Image: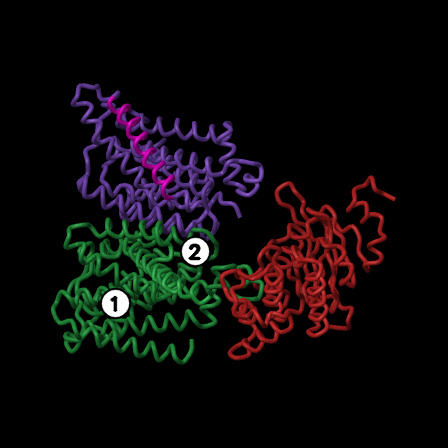
Amino acid sequence: MRRRDHIVWLAGGLIAVAATRLFQDAYSISVVNLVFIACLFAASFRFVMLIGEMSFASAAFVGVGAYGAGVATTLLHWPFALAMLVGPVVATLVSIGFGLIVLRIKGPYFMLIGFAFAEAVQIAAAQIQVIGGPSGMVGIFAPRILDAWMQSFVAAVVVTALYLLYRLEWSDFGRLLGAIQNNDNVARTVGVNVLGAKVTCFAVASFMAGLAGSLTAFVNNVIAPSDFGFMLANFALVYVKVGGERSLFGAVAGATVMVLLSSYSIVLGASNELFYGAAIVVTILLMPQGLAGLVEKIRLRLMAPKAVRREA
Amino acid sequence: MGGATSSLLRTSGLTKRFGGLTAVSDLSFDLRSGEILGLIGPNGAGKSTVFNLISGFTKPTAGRLELFGRDCTGSSALTISRMGLVRTFQHGSYMKAMTVRDNILIGTLQRLRGPARRKCVAETAEMLGLTSCLDRIAGSQPHGIQRLVSIAIALAARPRVLCLDEPLTGLNQTEVGGVLGVFQRIRNEFGTTILLVEHNTKAVMAVCDRIVVLHHGQQLAEGPPLEITSNADVIAAYLGPRHDR
Amino acid sequence: MMSATFVQLVIISLEIGSVYVLFSLGLTLIFGIMKVVNFAHGQFFAVSAILVTILVPFLAAHGLPVLPAYFLATATTVAVTVMIGWGVYQFGLVRFLRDMEGAFILTLGLAMLSDGLMLSIFGGAPRPEPVIVPGTVRIFAVAVLAQHVVVFGAAVCITGALYWSMTATRLGKALRAIASDHEAAMLQGIPYRRLSRDGFLIATALAAIAGALMAPISEVTPAVGNDYLMNGFMAVVVGGLGSVPGAILGAMFIAVIEAVGGYYVGPSAATMAIFVMVIVVLLIRPRGLLGRA
């Protein structure tokens, strides 16, 4: 990352957080919160895609984050900062164990076990009465002072997290992740601990998924196991593919567009699943590089005539 | 390590069976410090399996592998590469979608930290003549460049033993000459010991100090190039028994 | 002496297992041949199951005896499902052969789309199970519904027929050749595109048959596809992706855990137990019980 990038991030982040002040009615605020949280989850899902894997277990880690916040706030009465972080930390620890077992081999094993993990965690949550069983937990509130500032708080946390993910992606570690996706045997032959790098990548992404969960809990105040099925991770995949997986900004754009469109489509009466399913089918068939690829194509087409003229 | 003739890599009775097929049978050879050793043999002679065995990518059925004087039989690929034995692969031993610079960088990750990595990438690229294409995507480069990138990644790890799996495949005469020169420079400048698997026998004869010939998974002959070219068994193996002199 | 509980658990395991086997065979075939994890597999299953529960009462109401009605309904349903499968292959999957990620995402999107569509068309309520063979049979002093026995028998026959055709027919041999070594098969002039289509349609038919067989013995909702899909995934992961005997073994493994776990601790705990057991298997054999190294 160059110095200019850091400045752009700082400026962009400040603008994004400041922009949240423009929304004051309850509905707009809830949509803004949803958009930011979706961006974080999409970025987390995409981070695992850097090593060429899809982590459907992430849905469970969002759940772990949300329940961490719920338990810490309503049962243990921990301070807010701790309640925000306990879920992500637990998610990270669990993902390390999970990753060490399932990331050892190539192929879709990791992805498929991820589904089962999401299912198992969801069912487990519904069985435990202390955390509300199938009906979940209520009354997860952030401190009073944040009441009027919640959407800005969410935006600030998400932008910071995105910035960290971006930095990591453009560090040597990020390049290593790309190398592992490309040809993991080469990395292995030059002494890189490939499994360690994969697990680290997965753990970072799981922390971010957990953070998205904590934010969800404090924004909605109410959580239930059914909010965190594997379908949630399917949505994250849709965000990433629709926006374009090549860059973090593609994932962010995809999440923003899809959340805005789907909150509109619910008004029209279509189910979320139908809408997201259609979106990803259209994307993969017609624009495999997503919106980012489409923008790039249009840009090239607009520039092409000029280039021809110059040559003539 | 003792003098120039001390052995860095020694296999004794190395054997690998896949089901009923014996790919490598009772192979014993050693790689001496500072030499360029060629491992040749007709197709299906077990060269690639030998490579997989000594780099820890497959485990031997029987026999012993000794690296830098330590028993490494059954060690993982990671352990062996960290001890200083780095290998390339026959097909695409580099990252297609990444720039040449990032490709070489991967080789430095384990050994170096911070700015030293960038310095090593520059030096390695310089040595292999890759400086001008550092910012290009590796997969878009001509075949010859891709081969050099594979070697550059391995070299950036500054291995004590460099094992190259058919690095000359698909190169033209001029390119082969250039790469052979690179091998000699690697050996002379870094003191790297090189194990070379190649089917381009002429090139092997030109660059290697010593040659081991494999046939049907077994060692057929061993010695300096001149001796090998006149070895009756080797000629028979390559040309078929009817051409016996 | 065998206790009644034991006999009952064996029977339940076999019953669930027989449907899982058919389901997982399709998944593993598609993976072996096309290197595609088909997320829409459960949807073919669900469409078929739902159509059967609609067609059987409809045909019966028009005077057909229930058993012929069931056979006619099954034949129609399998034909319709295979047609849908052909469409999915021809207009979508054919562009993603051996592109694991692309094909998976496409089938995942189609599954979500179909899930949403079916929910809005058929509603989420469970549909009644048609009675095709009335009465009960006694096995080792345990009463079993006759139609469960019939379904089990049918599943075993179909599995046997598939197994035989994979080893004895030209098509089966070609499909196995592709699954074991794609490049070698291509070099021998095996028409890969046509065969991968055939393999996909056979797998789709298997899912449809499994759905039709499941309809008389278990509750049918549009969501049933996803439930079976998850357990099907676990079955092929345990057995080893791409392996036919592995799919059978894995499906029985999952069925036994589900039957025994479901009996002693309830269905929710059984789902968790399946996950734990799959992790245990992968700890010992990372590529599944019969997966190739």
Residue B187's mark? Answer: none
Left or right of C227, for residue B152: right
Nearer to me, A184 or B27: A184
Q: Which chain is purple?
A: C
SS at mark 2 in the image = helix
The magenta region covers: C69-92
Q: Chain of mark 1?
A: A
Nearer to me, C76 or B63: C76
Q: Which chain is red?
A: B
Report which residue position mark 2 lands on. A102
For the residues marked 1 and 2, what is the alpha-carbon distance in whole angstroms? Answer: 30 Å
Q: Which chain is green?
A: A
C212 vs B33: above or below: above
How many residues crowd mark 2 within 10 Å: few (<14), some (14–19), many (20+)?
many
Whole-percent x, y for residue A147 in the image: 15, 74
Image point (30%, 61%), residue name: A254
